[in-house]
Amino acid sequence: MTTLNDYLIASGLLFSIGLFGVMFRRNIIVIFMCLEMMLNAANLSLVAFSRFNTSAGLPDYNGQMLVFFIITVAAAEVAVGLAIIIAMFRSRRTVDVDEISSMKG
Amino acid sequence: MTSTYASIILLFPLFSAAAILLGLKKKANISALVATGSALLTLVLSVLVLNAKEWSSVTLLQWSKVGGLELGIDLKIDQLSSGMMLVVTGVGALVHLFSLIYMKKDAGKARFFAGLSLFMFSMTGIVYSANLAMMFIFWELVGVSSYILIGHWFEKNSAADAAKKAFLTNRIGDFGFMIGILLLWAATREISFDGLSNAVAAGNMAPGLLAAATLCIFCGTVGKSAQFPLHVWLPDAMEGPTPVSALIHAATMVAAGVYMLVRVSFLIEASGWAADVIAWIGGISALLAALMATQQNDIKRVLAYSTLSQLGYMVMACGLLASEAGMFHLFTHAWFKAGLFLGSGAIIYACHHEQDIWKMGGLKDKMPVTFATFGLCTAALIAVPFTSGWWSKEAILEAAYKNDGLLFPIAAGTALLTAFYMTRLFVVVFFGKGRDSHVAGHAHEVPMLMRAPLIILAVLAVLAGFALIAGPVLGDEYAKYSQFHFSVPAIVSILTLALGVGLGLKLYAGRDREPVNIKLFANKFYFDELYAKIVKLCQDSVAAVARVLDGLLIDGVGVGGTRGFANMTGNALRRIQSGNLQGYACLFGAGVLVIVLLALL
Amino acid sequence: MPAYYLEIAVVVLGLVLLLVEAFTPPQHKRRIGWAALAGIAATFLLLLTVKSHCGCDSPMWQFYDDSSLSLFFKGLALLCTAFVLMLGLEYLPVLEKYSARAGGGPATGEFFALPVLICAGLMWMASAIDITTIFLSLELTTIGFYIMVAYMRRNVGSLEAGVKYLILGALSTGILVYGLSWLFGATGQTGLDAIRTALPSAARGPALFAFALILIALCFKIAAVPFHFWVPDVYQGAPTPVTAFLSVGSKAAGFLVAIRLMEPFLAVESLRTTCIAILVAVACATLILGNLAAIPQGNFKRLLAYSSISHAGFLLLALASDRHTGELTSTRIIAFYLSAYLCMTLLAFAVLIIINKSTGSDELKAFDGLHRRNPFLGFATLIAAASLAGVPLTAGFLGKFFVFIAAAGAQQWLAIGIAVAGAAAGFYYYFKVIRHVYWNTAPEGAAAIPVSPVAKSLLIILIAATLVLGVYPQLILGLL
């Protein structure tokens, strides 16, 4: 029987992988995928919390409702984000974040 | 009735400044007349207020009243503020009159008079403040108007630099002041003088906290009254037009620091050792400034150091719990020092804007009125018996003598030096022969409108100390200071006077060049150089620390092989802002780890 | 009229504008801006008629709040949007240059529709009292801002700023939802009222973990150290009206959410000490870095970016000093500070846009001799800089003063020391701007700078507001 802790550890791993990916990967598309992974880590923990927090035998649906909103928002974020990245690619011809550093100081 | 007058005194200069800045800027002569008119009106009204003797408090504007914090423009009309107000408007009105001629041909005349009006408004605000918050706000405003007026001739680099120096040095003191206000508020939930006085009397504050708060408040005085170690700005402030030096940097604004100490004298009395610190800072300032004054060649700088030294006296008196004596000296000093500054203005005006005393000389015959008035004011400053300065300096020496520490010799030594350097100045400028024909040769007496203020101030310099004048202005309890009785301080003061004047005459009568040369004094004890060094040292050490930290960051994390960290070389903050998204993400992640660890550990 | 009609009105306005925009010929895009401005102004008038609900216990009120605080922040959002739209109208020439379509004319219409939709998000954020609505409204504004920041697609700086904001913004979103999931896990609730009741009995570890993650995400929104890295670059690259919107609107809403989300944690005695310590630490770091890094800046937009960071430090200090201020609660102080910040920051950005239009530069050098080239503009800069620095009789001074009062009440002496030093440094770099305006001489052949009537009225309103709030804070404090 999987316990709440198993789910939380899985979601924590997912979150960490995402965070470290954002910190250390250089391809902007990969970074973006890592960001989505972090959102999914949150979704997983939300569903787990909601499933294990039962009242009268039913899960707490508030948490699951939030999951659906997060999925929707993530879709919108990807749409806008990819559009910006494509516009960037058109002008710079690169997806390497190291080369996006003209403004500094 | 008095409260109405007081409100008008406060607001009229503001209207005048606003009218000049908004509408009359192009019509310089009308601007000058508007400002002068407002100054004269406030003088008349402050005489009326003094005469009525109806003490009251009035709230002009309530800003906010939340959580026990009542912020507002509250005017406190009592003997102290009314007396101070007479000094401010009296000197102010005379300086306005004098400036009508002195600034006649100046291109920025309208701006100058707007600045004067703004200053009068802010100074009135300080004097009438009934609470510390209002005082702080007007405190800043006088700083701003002083900044504008010192930098009046901003085309000159030295003037712009002096303005900046004055402003920045004052900020250091002001932050102490602000912290002091906050400490008092935190401890007593009061910022009005009356409320604080009651709270202190009731013993609501821990002694240590009280002393700390008093010293923080005193920081404001150190900045505004140019006490050691923040004294460096005042001599440079002489870059402003001379009437400004007379009004702001001799008679009123710099005295605001002392006035504030008198207002919070209940704090000083309760603060224990903090009072000693205040007295010592005052004593040290008085002595150091007098030493520096002996070797200055610019007529205004001699007077500037003399002002520093006299302010030191007043601060010392406040620290010795003799704030009445300090206030008395403030009152007499305002007249004779304004007279000296306006006199020097007349000399500079006559000598085609030359300020070096060694190029003057022999002005006695060419400018008899200036000579006579300058002489009387000098007599008051060096405390010739029965002049106003004598009475007030006696009061302070008396206080120092009672304290029977090292402060009495310091005060007496300062008195000796004062007599010495003023004799030097007087002899070199007025006697002997004209040393530079272009400068002193064509000198001639100044017009009537400039002479009149000089004469009035000279008369006051002699008479202001008598109970007849000091009594009604400062309060009847001041009458006791102008009664002569023999005592050790009185004898010491006459001896130092004779010694100082004799020494000055011996060394300088008939000389055309400086006979003594003490580099240390002439270079003002190298304070400016020292401060420049300290600032540089701070910058260098910050840079060094940043370099070390950077090395740690690179060596420590760079091994991890991430380019984000490796890119962060060079000096600290700007390099962290490398523009590299990867670097930002890494630091973001590091921040996440730090905060999460902070929260969980 | 119930408060939620306002958001509906604004969303409908935004959608209608988008629809109309598609059929407006390129030379008339300016009209979209005017229509948006009129709509926002009308909504602001409607806001004045809103009454708080009366005891009707529909489930609606468990996630939607219409207290005076919420209404106040709705008003702030509407005003800010209106000013930004005016700035946008002023900025149109620059925008047209950099937003050309591949084969056709400039595409500027959406530039006026998007702020309206973002405004809806900000207003909704002001009322959100459930973690679901907080998350949704926050994302509505953030995604809108992604587009706005990268709007000038022919300008490399704008695109680069867009990418940086996108990645770091999404990162903070990820952290926020993860934090919210743990808050949900620790308390089993999503409504803030229910969370406040449940939190004292929650496990300490998960609660603090949630607190840290939520704080981090909010620190990103309000530009606090060490999550401020996007601020200077994004401010510099984004179109200036968007920068102004980000720095005022986004920060104001972020702080209201911070007040709401932090409050349950600060109310629990066992968590309070840790939470306050972290808040103060972040505030101090923000004050130090924001002020120190601002000193060497020569670009006015970057200077304002660091200024925005340092103001966030002051606001955080107020947030950390709750409970010790009697009626002058930290919420009121923050509301006042943000109102003051709105006036002075928008004033500074308005001046910048006018100068940029004439000189094409955001550098401080472009301000040289402004006093002679346009005295009124010089005066506006003077007021903005004086208020940002905290000169008495300006709104900025009272804001800082209230924060000091609150912090003194909470006995945060170290933080006060740092804040005072930061304010001193602030005087230095803001007066650098004034020096450029009044002391430096204009470059050879510099022409006078024209100011359009729209811009002039905007400047006058903002100057007046800055000065009035500086002497009469009751105007704002009385509303709460």
Image (cartoon, coloured by chain):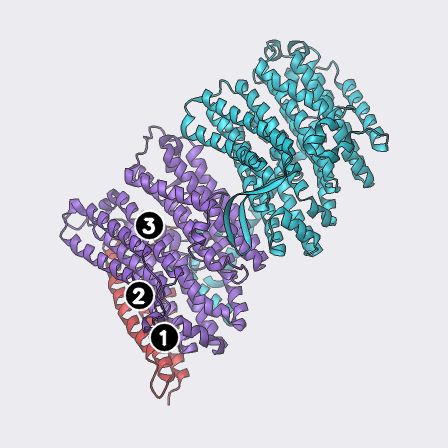
Q: How much space separates mark 1 and mark 2, taking CA atoms?
A: 14 Å
* Chain B palette colour: cyan
Nearer to the camera, C184 or C62: C62
Three-letter amino acid code at the position of disc 1: Leu
Three-letter amino acid code at the position of disc 2: Phe
- In the displayed structure, does residue C249 sit left or right of residue B594? left
Callout 2 secondary element: helix
Residue depicted at x 51% and y 58%? C327
- In the displayed structure, does residue B549 sit left or right of residue A63? right
x and y, in percent, of residue C359 in the image: 31, 37
Callout 1 secondary element: helix
Query: Is the same chain shared between marks 3 and 2?
Result: no
Question: Are circles 3 and 2 on residues that touch, CB within 8 Å?
Answer: no
Residue depicted at x 52% and y 69%? C272
Q: How much space separates mark 3 and mark 2, taking CA atoms?
A: 21 Å
Q: Tag 2, which chain?
A: A
Chain for colour purple: C
Crowd around label 1: few <14 · some 14–19 · many ≥20 (10 Å)? some
Crowd around label 3: few <14 · some 14–19 · many ≥20 (10 Å)? many
Q: How much space separates mark 1 and mark 3, taking CA atoms?
A: 33 Å
The disc at residue A14 is 1
Which is nearer the N-term, disc 1 or disc 2? 1
The disc at residue C237 is 3
* Chain A palette colour: red
- In the displayed structure, does residue C381 sit left or right of residue C104? right
Three-letter amino acid code at the position of disc 3: Gly
x and y, in percent, of residue B440 in the image: 62, 12
> Where B526 falls versus C288 (above or below)?
above
